[in-house]
Amino acid sequence: MAATSRKLLNNETRLHLIRHAHELHNSKEGTNPQLSPLGSQQVRDERKNLFATGVMQRIQLVVTSPMLRTLQTSVGVFVGSEKHGDNCNNHPRIIATELCRVRMIESEDDISWEAEESETDEAVAARGVEFIKWLLEREEKEIAVVSHGGFLQQTLLAIGHKCHPLVDGDNLTP
């Protein structure tokens, strides 16, 4: 995530999009894996980066997918831990919402599963557009979003041509 020095206009909202850190890949973890040791290091590195660039001090709200790896990333980056000497009482509010979660999949553990097959790219994009509309209606002007690569990609592809000129929807990759 790169910080920008451009100042926000009165009614602009700045979104800081963050893909969750590296997760464990094994059958025991199922469809909701936790972060790997590499992911834990990525979280610590991103926290340091956000402090160093001044972004951390500006974030008013963190919105995250309710999946374990995104929750661990959100809390690790924006709350930190007492064992690392962080002040755990001075951090932005974190909200989890199904709107920005990974593609809905068939699983007995997935309480949001309603369809006969996996969510299409078009359905993910439509959900992403609704998510962005919801974010832009909020009063907070500096919002961090911690989600999944596929969700972020489909959302940005859907809205890319309607965004700031610096957002190029044709060149987005996971």
Image: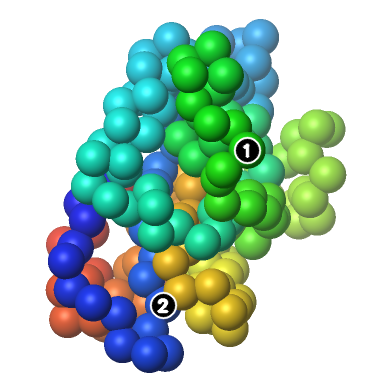
Under mark 2, the amino acid is Thr
List x then y, in percent, for residue 28.
66, 9
List x then y, in percent, for residue 83.
54, 12
Residue 94 sits above or below residue 43 on the image: below
2 or 67: nearer the viewer: 2
Say few, some or many: other residues with alpha carbon within 10 Å of mark 1 (under 14 / 14 to 19 / 20 or more): few
Disc on the earlier residue, 2 or 1 = 2
Which residue sits at x=37%, y=34%?
Answer: 47
Displayed quadrant of residue 90? top right
Under mark 1, the amino acid is Asn
Report the side of 49 relative to 11 (left or right): left
Which residue sits at x=76%, y=56%?
Answer: 115
List x then y, in percent, for residue 73.
50, 33
Report the side of 61 relative to 109 (left or right): left
User: Do we see residue 152 in this rendering?
Assistant: no
Q: Which residue is mark 2?
A: 13
- How many numbered marks, from 0 up? 2
Q: Which residue is mark 1?
A: 89
Report the side of 151 relative to 46 (left or right): right
160 or 83: nearer the viewer: 83
Residue 10 sits above or below residue 122 on the image: below
